[in-house]
Image (tube, rainbow, N blue to C red):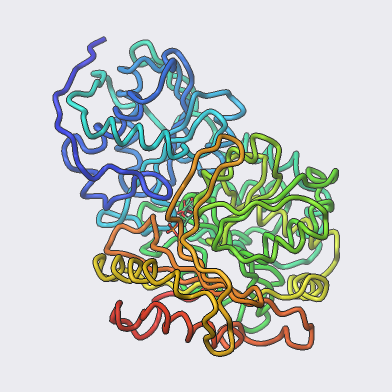
Amino acid sequence: MNIRTIATEPFDDQKPGTSGLRKPVPTFQKPNYLENFIQSIFDSQENYQGQRLVLGGDGRYYNRTAIQTILKMAAANGVGRVLVGQGGLLSTPAASCLIRKYQAFGGIILSASHNPGGTDGDFGVKFNIPNGGPAPAEVTETIFARSQEIREYYILDADEINLDQPGETQIGNMTVEVVDSVADYADLMASIFDFDAIGNLLSGGFRMVMDALHAVTGPYAKEILENRLQAPNGTVRNGEPLEDFGGGHPDPNLVYARELVETMYGNNPPAFGAASDGDGDRNMILGDHFFVTPSDSLAILAANATLVPGYAQGITGVARSMPTSQAVDRVAKQLGIDCYETPTGWKFFGNLLDAGKVTLCGEESFGTGSNHVREKDGLWAILFWLNIIAKRGQSVEEIVKDHWQTYGRTYYSRHDYEGVDKDSANTLMENLRSGLSNLPGKVFHGYEVTLADDFSYRDPIDGSTAEKQGIRIVFKDGSRLVFRLSGTGTHGATLRVYLERYEPDSSKQNQDSQTALGDLIAIADEIAQIKTMTGRDEPSVIT
Ligand code: G16
């Protein structure tokens, strides 16, 4: 066994963003770039020698190469056993499931999530902690600090591991166990949902389509929907994971999941359409000519949770990220449970879930999840919807409209300005920030500002704080505008503008949301000078 010590120099751009370190593939291919970051992860951990690590990724280009390197580095750093997904594949929620089930000290998940892949696409590395969730800020800061002073890394001289054959191999003192990527996760889903009811629905003529966008969810969806739940073959579309996602953008929204949207808005569509993203943690839910906003989806899951066996006893509380609409707050109020508002990023839910304060959580960014793992979970959300449909015997549209009748409708939309100039985006945010104190009391298009701040959060469990988490402008009727810069992009800056208006009157709940939000859209431009500052006439993506 020969462990080599390789001299290296720090890279100054290894600060993890909203969800791990994301960079274009050529950046990760620079000599020592991946190795430095991985060594920094090991260096920032304590007492992991001899312990288990979970390793896998979303199958994008560079996944297999990176896995081989990480295995040799894990062996050189004293890891006892690595559970690696067959073919190098593990969805993010499946990795979380394995970390928890097999008590690993952590997991390394290789994904740039919804960002495009391929030789010129993006790649990413995420580190998850023993609870199965994304590393919190204090951990990512330690990793980053280490990456700024790193001088050497350790790697074992070893042959490549066959990732396609389940079973165990020894490299140095470490065991590599290639595990079925799907089985444990599928078992977990079967333990939560009413598979009999969903199976009867899917084998009984109910038509659905699940678009895996050639990303990691394909094998999971095929096993669960087509094998275990007996949906007809072909229910899962684009189910084969490809290194470049077939040239597509594995982001389940109305723009990038175009094929699915065309099906669901075409002639004689299926009753239910769903999609997931690159690493399987996001979801989009569609009915026949009907789109469910992620914020509404969270509220509806919370309101219907007791229809699902895993939540039949009720939910303890809910949490949403700040820019997510307040629809779920209204459900929480009616249920008499707590609702927490956290900054954007799944890592902020971990402590609340661990402490049993919340059962369900979600984000406007097409993410919903629960205490079953510590990541958002695309297929879980899809199964949750199928469970509700099977029990209520209603269409997606009927379920959503019933919900609006009971709780009121929260018109909601997110406008993304992608790839804008970084300096202009920062100036826009700075201008907004400096003008905040002048806003309260001002009236725009009949909307009076009651609060204007830069959101900050104090974690109720460990007291940690997070500042500057997005500009919030709240109006007298509860309508809101939120501005923040994306923490997951890799080219220029992406400005996100979140718009929300509450409509309790059921006779006014059937407007198109862009029309219903028209005044707020105009106000957003007036206050933030979006067109002038970005040079764009309109957003690149509207969801
Ligand atoms: C990641 C995080 C999410 C977050 C999203 C938004 O999603 O895991 O918690 O809501 O980014 O990111 P941005 O900063 O771009 O608005 P994913 O699916 O990319 O891992």
Q: Quadrant of the N terminus?
A: top left
Question: Is 153 in front, or is 360?
Answer: 360
Quadrant for residue 73, please give it: top left
Residue at image coords 61%, 81%: 265
User: Where is residue 17 drawn, in percent x and y?
Assistant: 37, 49
Image check: 212 left or right of 493? right
Image check: 493 left or right of 373? left
Whether residue 407 is visible to the viewer of this picture, yes or no, is yes
Above or below: residue 106 compared with residue 79: below
Above or below: residue 51 compared with residue 32: above
Residue at image coords 67%, 63%: 297
Question: Is 52 in front, or is 179?
Answer: 52
Quadrant for residue 321, please give it: bottom right
Above or below: residue 505 compared with residue 60: below
User: Where is residue 57 drawn, in percent x and y?
Assistant: 43, 42
Residue at image coords 31%, 36%: 144
Residue at image coords 56%, 52%: 342
User: Where is residue 266 drawn, in percent x and y?
Assistant: 60, 82
Whether residue 203 is visible to the viewer of this picture, yes or no, is no
Above or below: residue 341 compared with residue 161: below
User: Where is residue 188 drawn, in percent x and y?
Assistant: 68, 38
Q: Give the mark count.
A: 0
